Amino acid sequence: MEKRRSAGFNEAMSLLEKSLIGLASLALLVLTGLTTADALGRYLINSPIPGTGEIIEDYFMIALIFLPLSYSFMQEGHVHVTVIERYFPKAVKWAVGKVNLLLSFVFFCLITLAGWDRFIEAWRIDEISTSSVGYPMWPCYLMVPIGCGLLCLRIGQVFSGRVKKAKTAAPDEDRVA
């Protein structure tokens, strides 16, 4: 029963991660189109799109960074520095890995909590951007605790051994730049 519940939770997490990847991909597509339209407007008709820089900075960059955090973690997509660690014995690597997971969990939990507080405050006061367009700020603040909170759940799963990260195509020794 426990295994089935754990598998269901893992499937739900995977579905949520794929949905967030889809949103981040859509954000990248819109960001590219908006940047292109802004550049064309700026250089062809001397009329850029108002607020483009701020919208890209406040919404699209946040979406591209925070929404795929958990998926990237599970796919071993984050940068690893293994200059020294690859020479450690297996037991030391395991211990270092657990400490790294624990520290990452604490760090991203703090970001999640601070991001949630910031989102609640922006929602409560109906915060509007200071750009010429004046768009609501709460959606961009919501992306931070969603991305970091999901990452915390995944780190907890990996730490407890309930789920394994995807195997990398090449061993660490081959991935060193």
Image: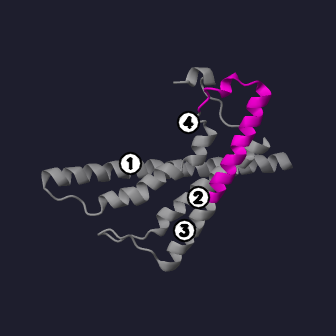
Q: CA distance from mark 3 to mark 4?
A: 28 Å
Label placed on residue 146: 2
The reply to whether the C-beta atoms of the residues labelled 3 and 2 are less than 8 Å apart is no
The amino acid pointed to by label 4 is Val
Residue numbers of the magenta segment: 81-110
- Residue, far top: 174
Describe residue 101's horizontal placement relative to residue 35 as left or right: right
Describe residue 141's horizontal placement relative to residue 45 as left or right: right
From this viewpoint, is residue 144 visible?
A: yes
* Residue 87 colored in magenta in the image: yes
- From the image, state whether disc 3 or disc 2 is nearer to you: 3
Describe residue 65's horizontal placement relative to residue 11 as left or right: left
Q: Position of residue 157 (x, y in %)?
A: 74, 46
Q: Position of residue 154 (x, y in %)?
A: 68, 47
Secondary element at tag 2: helix
Q: Position of residue 24 (x, y in %)?
A: 48, 50
Please tell me which of labels 3 and 4 falls first in the chain: 4
Which residue matches tag 4? Answer: 79
Residue at (59%, 34%) from the top-left corner? 80
Residue 10 or residue 116, whichever sits in front? 116
Residue 65 or residue 16, whichever sits in front? 65
Q: CA distance from mark 4 to mark 2?
A: 21 Å
Q: CA distance from mark 1 to mark 2?
A: 21 Å
Q: In the figure, residue 176 lies in which quadrant?
A: top right
Residue at (47%, 77%) from the top-left corner? 126
**Vertical order, 158 against 5 (above or below):** above
Q: CA distance from mark 1 to mark 4?
A: 24 Å
Q: Position of residue 143 (x, y in %)?
A: 53, 59
- From the image, state whether disc 4 or disc 2 is nearer to you: 4
Which residue matches tag 1? Answer: 29
